[in-house]
Amino acid sequence: MPDFAAPLGANDAGCPAPIDQSRRAYAEGWAINAAHYERQGLYAQLAERLGPQPRLLDLGCGLGHGLAALRADAWIGVDENPYALAAAADRLGVSASLIQSDLLRPDPALNALGSFDAVTLWFPGTHPARVQDPVVRAHGLTEDARYVVAMQLIALRLAAVRLREGGVVQIVDRAAEDDPAVVAAAYRENLRAMAAGLPLALTEVAVIPYTEPAAGIAVGSARLDRRSRPTWAVSLLLQKGKPRRVATAG
Ligand SMILES: C[S@@+](CC[C@H](N)C(=O)[O-])C[C@H]1O[C@@H](n2cnc3c(N)ncnc32)[C@H](O)[C@@H]1O
């Protein structure tokens, strides 16, 4: 397993320079967003929706802000960006539970992780040079909005396999809209469609007001235009097993 406490960039010696630079810039940019969200208490509010968990898998863990807020007895963080993972190792004071893996590619290391009580995917997104990746191009994921949906589908499928019966997957996304009820309804419908055929039932949709930083990573999503509308973090909980009533919170 790579050593994320090593100097930045040391994990991916063979990585082409443009990808390496793009990953580094993305990790630096996301640090601005994440610090802004953390100051607002957003990560703590999102962690509250999920509650304490014995064993948790955080997908696209980034710089570890989510893992720092989430309450888990044991956790594993996965990210494809070694600069993000190095920052997460610093923040969390541990590197052994951080795995570099690209969720768009099969990885036997992830299959060997066993089962989890919770799986999280908070604020999926990627660096701009990912458009050069043949897998991203082959699946038509060169637009941010499509990339985000692909990551959500991957997280749901992975959760369907890796969660224990009764375990929970939490997806968190960002939206801009005047009416939070419109946001909740749209995500409820989308997530139900995305989880169709999987043993996952939507149990809660929470829409939480927050603000984006003036700098940092802007999301090129049709649902998020921070210049003109109020912004909302949307937390979606899906449980593995029998369907229950969906609660709307926030
Ligand atoms: C916007 S950041 C969010 C980080 C963290 N979840 C948070 O809430 O602060 C998205 C993270 O997902 C990671 N990511 C994107 N695509 C990925 C993939 N295919 N496999 C693994 N990680 C990925 C990025 O490297 C980045 O660190």
Image (cartoon, grey):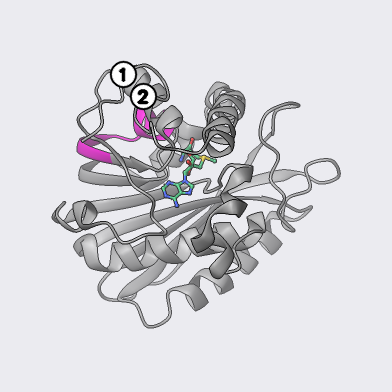
Q: Is residue 127 visible?
A: yes
Quarter of the image where the N terminus is located: top left
Amino acid residing under circle 1? Ala
**Residue at the image point whose x is 37% and y is 72% from the top:** 201
Q: For the residues carrying marks 2 and 1, which lies nearer the camera in this image? A: 2
Q: How many marks?
A: 2
When asked about the image quadrant of residue 181, the answer is bottom right
**Residue at the image point whose x is 81% and y is 46% from the top:** 229
Nearer to the camera, 207 or 7:
7
Task: Give the extent of the magenta segment.
Answer: 65-76
Nearer to the camera, 200 or 151:
151
Tag 2 near tag 1, CB within 8 Å: yes
Q: Position of residue 64 (x, y in %)?
A: 39, 30
Q: Is residue 208 visible?
A: no
Nearer to the camera, 46 or 91:
91
Residue pointed to by mark 1: 6
Residue pointed to by mark 2: 10
Amino acid residing under circle 2? Ala
